[in-house]
Amino acid sequence: MIRRPPRSTLFPYTTLFRSVETHRNLLGTRLTCRSIDYDAANSCKEFVVERRPFNVFRWLLKCVFLAAFLFTLNLHNLGSSSAQALLLFALVMAVVLRVNLTVQKESLLVVSSVGLQLTTTFVSGRKVRKFIGSQSIEAFVINEGITMHCVLCYLAVILKGDSPEMYIIFPSTWPRLNFLTQVYNCVNALILRK
């Protein structure tokens, strides 16, 4: 795991430049895309894609409306409280799963001649990190995925080996092509020296 430089007010020059842009991805979700330079030599740069904050109140309100709808279907008159308990348990589990599986933020930390660290932060606060060393990277590509309704552009790292693997960067947020191009150019300059 790569440690980030401190962001304290005692060290005002650790974060030299931040650029922020807000847009919607191809799926309609509002995203905030940031690129952060940690030093003047551009040897450490971080790219962060963040969704709007998760609204627990809205999800609870949806559950209440769903329960009211099911109440109007007279499911409460089944004569058994086990059906009501099962319904309440299903609604609570839906909220818990939504909180634990929704991605809030994805970041890519690029450190020259060291590698890449991908961090996925979920709404519940859980973080999943993956480190890819620079010696194991064969190529860094922007690719297109075609669905029935749209074309999705995504970044991918192709790893060296007998059977090359491909690892997708920002797989949950799907930022726009202009931000992906910035990341692509930075990784090619810092890691692959192109």
Image (tube, rainbow, N blue to C red):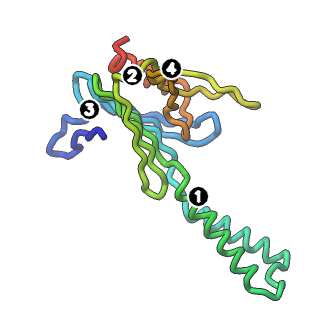
- Which residue corresponds to mark 4? 141
Of mark 4 and mark 1, the one earlier in the sequence is 1
Image quarter (top left, top right, bottom left or bottom right) of the C terminus? top left
> Which one is in front in this view, the residue at disc 2 or the one at disc 3?
2
State the separation of the CA atoms marked 2 and 1.
Answer: 33 Å
State the separation of the CA atoms marked 3 and 4.
Answer: 24 Å
> Residue 72 in the image: x percent, y percent?
83, 76
> Which one is in front in this view, the residue at disc 1 or the one at disc 3?
1
Q: Residue shown at 46%/38% (left/top)? A: 49
Using a 10 Å C-alpha cutoff, classify the residue at mark 3 as few (fewer than 14 neighbours), some (14 to 19) or many (20 or more): many
Image quarter (top left, top right, bottom left or bottom right) of the N terminus? top left
- Which residue corresponds to mark 3? 38
Q: Are marks 3 and 4 in contact (CB under 8 Å)?
A: no
Q: On screen, 5 above or below 80?
A: above
Which of the numbered marks, if any, corresponds to residue 98?
A: 1
> Residue 78 in the image: x percent, y percent?
83, 84
Of mark 2 and mark 3, the one earlier in the sequence is 3
